[in-house]
């Protein structure tokens, strides 16, 4: 377990650069389901080669829970504030699969969580920030840097989901508008760092979708799956663009 953590934590400082992120939600009729967060960070392999070598293993295919990770880092966690520890606890039941193949230059990370009702859904981007917070040496924690403040464990957005059997809502709100305005001044930096990173939403519904408020939405042939492509820059610079409503056909 220790070797696996030694591989993943140092990479999180640059994890969002060149990544392809897909947020999958598999929704059941009663509002329960599963969220699967897939991250393809193969583009980082050239940058991370030396760190992978330090682990003594070129290939990893491992599944673990956040609870196991937290147990391994319990000494560091004990030094965190009560608020930070409470934030970590929210993600204890998240499972994670890490696949690394140095020879093939592949690095894939998947996180998944089952939920009983839609209101229990959490922002899985926060799960990545939680992992970042476990590595104090590389976590982006400079409070004077507006970009860093947006990417730290606190973040500057609040994501919520709702489903009433007819309409599914994804709402992403900005917590601190002033901080968001400051971030807009870093547009050139954002494009340089995250211009090649994409955030794709792919939601699977129990019946046909009638309409989606986002005009860029793509439908599967049976209209039960909706795909919406974004740039990661959208998430950082204009998070409200990632709010939308999905109306389902009648039963």
Image: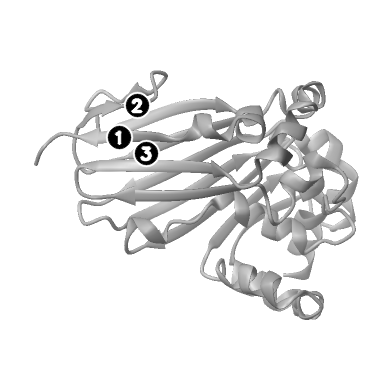
Helix, strand or loop at mark 2: loop
Is disc 1 surrounded by few (<14), some (14 to 19) or many (20+) residues within 10 Å?
Answer: many
Foreground residue among 183 and 224: 183
Q: Which mark is residue 160?
A: none
Instruction: Indicate the quadrant where residue 117 lies.
Output: bottom left
Q: Which residue carries the number 2 mark?
A: 213
Instruction: Provide the secondary structure element on which disc 1 rests.
Output: strand
User: Disc 1, disc 2: CB below 8 Å?
Assistant: yes
Instruction: Name the residue at 52% across, 47% down.
Output: 37
Q: Is residue 243 left or right of residue 180?
A: left
Badge 3 local density, few (<14 within 10 Å), some, or many (20+)? some
Whole-angstrom CA distance, mark 1 to mark 2, is: 7 Å
Helix, strand or loop at disc 3?
strand
- The residue shown at (9%, 41%) is 251
Residue for badge 3? 203
Specify whether residue 41 is in view.
Answer: no
Percent x, y for residue 44?
77, 36
Q: Are marks 1 and 3 in contact (CB under 8 Å)?
A: yes
Residue named by callout 1: 246
Vertical arrangement, residue 5 with respect to residue 124, above or below: below
Identify the residue at horizontal 76%, vertical 23% (top origin).
187
CA gap, disc 1 and disc 3: 10 Å
Is 130 left, or right, of 186 in this rendering?
Answer: left
Q: Which image quadrant: the N terminus?
A: bottom right
Whichever of labels 2 and 3 marks the residue nearer the N terminus, that label is: 3
């Amino acid at each position: 377990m220790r070797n696996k953590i030694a591989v993943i934590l140092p990479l999180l400082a640059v994890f969002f650069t060149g990544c392809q992120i897909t947020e999958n939600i598999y929704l059941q009729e009663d509002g329960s389901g599963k969220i699967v967060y897939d991250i393809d960070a193969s583009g980082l392999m050239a940058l991370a080669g030396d760190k992978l070598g330090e682990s003594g293993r070129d290939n990893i295919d491992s599944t673990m829970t956040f609870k196991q990770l937290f147990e391994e880092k319990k000494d560091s966690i004990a030094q965190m504030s009560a608020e930070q520890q409470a934030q970590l606890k929210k993600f204890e039941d998240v499972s994670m699969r890490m696949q690394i193949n140095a020879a093939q230059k592949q690095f894939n990370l998947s996180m998944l969580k089952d939920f009983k009702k839609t209101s229990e859904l959490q922002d899985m981007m926060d799960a990545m920030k939680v992992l970042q917070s476990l590595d104090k040496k590389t976590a982006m924690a400079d409070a004077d840097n507006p970009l860093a403040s947006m990417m730290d464990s606190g973040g500057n957005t609040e994501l919520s989901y709702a489903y009433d059997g007819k309409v599914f809502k994804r709402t992403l709100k900005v917590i601190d508008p002033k901080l968001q305005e400051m971030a807009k001044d870093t547009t050139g930096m954002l494009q340089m760092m995250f211009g090649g990173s994409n955030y794709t939403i792919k939601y699977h519904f129990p019946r046909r979708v009638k309409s989606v408020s986002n005009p860029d939405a793509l439908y599967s042939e049976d209209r039960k799956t909706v795909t919406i492509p974004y740039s990661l820059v959208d998430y950082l610079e204009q998070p409200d663009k990632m709010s939308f409503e999905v109306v389902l056909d009648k039963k």
